[in-house]
Image: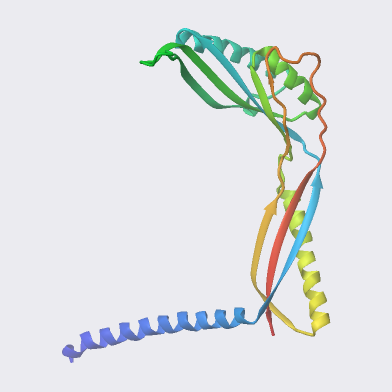
Amino acid sequence: MNNFKPLIIIATVTIALFGVFLLVEIDRLWNTAATTNTVSFNGEGKVLAVPDIAMISASIVTQAVNSKTAQDQNSKKSQAVADFLKKQGIDEKDIKTTDYNIYPQYKYSSYGGQATITGYQVTQSYQVKVRDLEKVSAVLDGLVSAGANQVNNLGLQVEDPEKLKTEARQKAIEDAKKKADELKDQVGIKLGRIVNFSENTGGYPIPMMYATDRGIGGGGGPEISVGQNEIVVSVTITYQIK
């Protein structure tokens, strides 16, 4: 009897594996059959929102004969910029350093040969989040006065768009279902369960091309028009045809 135990174990394992394979194959065939006779509908939902924050990119660029002097000058201007932003009521967590680079400056001989280093340039870049949009103009103007050589890439956006995306998604689903109901009535088909759903979301900050160098322009800060953001959600719903 003991001689048959290995054979019994092997047979049991084989039957179990065959059962698993059979279940997987049945599920595959079921899904294939369910998706073969299908129809898809697209829907789109749009929501307009007034931006509530502004994102400003600014850079401080300094040059000197040696790198330490260039860095010291940059740090001094950076502190002046930080002090200005603090006076504007901008929280420290809304000021982020995005880049810091030290570049040697070269002089090239017109007769060829090896280039010589004539100095160093230090660039420190920031991203500033302004929550009070009424202060955007003053912040743009004040950054330059405080020492930022370059101020650009102003973007107005909605800080928390998820609630608006949910609203736009609901509109898109309703749009797709409306189209499904219309076709069902017109053609006389019966729709079964939903076998597939896909979604695509758009909606971007409003870009505003603002750029300046220290000493250029002058006068008061620019007038900023807030406008509106458009959040768009597109969905595709696939139904099984009964």
Whole-percent x, y for residue 31 in the image: 56, 79
Q: Which quadrant holds residue 239?
A: bottom right
Q: Residue furthest bottom?
A: 1
Q: Is residue 88 above or below residue 3?
A: above
Q: How many marks?
A: 0
Quarter placement of the C terminus:
bottom right
Q: Residue furthest left?
A: 3
Q: Is residue 24 left or right of residue 226?
A: left
Q: As rendered, which of 69 and 133 lies closer to the eye?
A: 69
Whole-percent x, y for residue 143 in the image: 69, 18
Q: Which quadrant holds residue 50?
A: top right
Quarter placement of the N terminus:
bottom left
Q: Is residue 95 above or below residue 170?
A: above
- Which residue is drawn at the image coordinates 35% and 86% (left, top)? 15
- Which residue is drawn at the image coordinates 76% and 67% (left, top)? 176
Q: As rendered, which of 37 and 118 lies closer to the eye?
A: 118
Q: Which quadrant holds residue 196?
A: bottom right
Whole-percent x, y for residue 165 in the image: 73, 52
Q: Is residue 10 left or right of residue 26?
A: left
Q: Is residue 42 left or right of residue 102?
A: right
Q: As rendered, which of 46 and 23 lies closer to the eye?
A: 46
Q: How was this image coloured?
A: rainbow
Q: Is residue 203 above or below residue 103?
A: below
- Which residue is drawn at the image coordinates 80% and 14% (left, top)? 219
- Which residue is drawn at the image coordinates 74% and 40% (left, top)? 158
Whole-percent x, y for residue 13 in the image: 31, 82
Q: Is residue 175 left or right of residue 83?
A: right
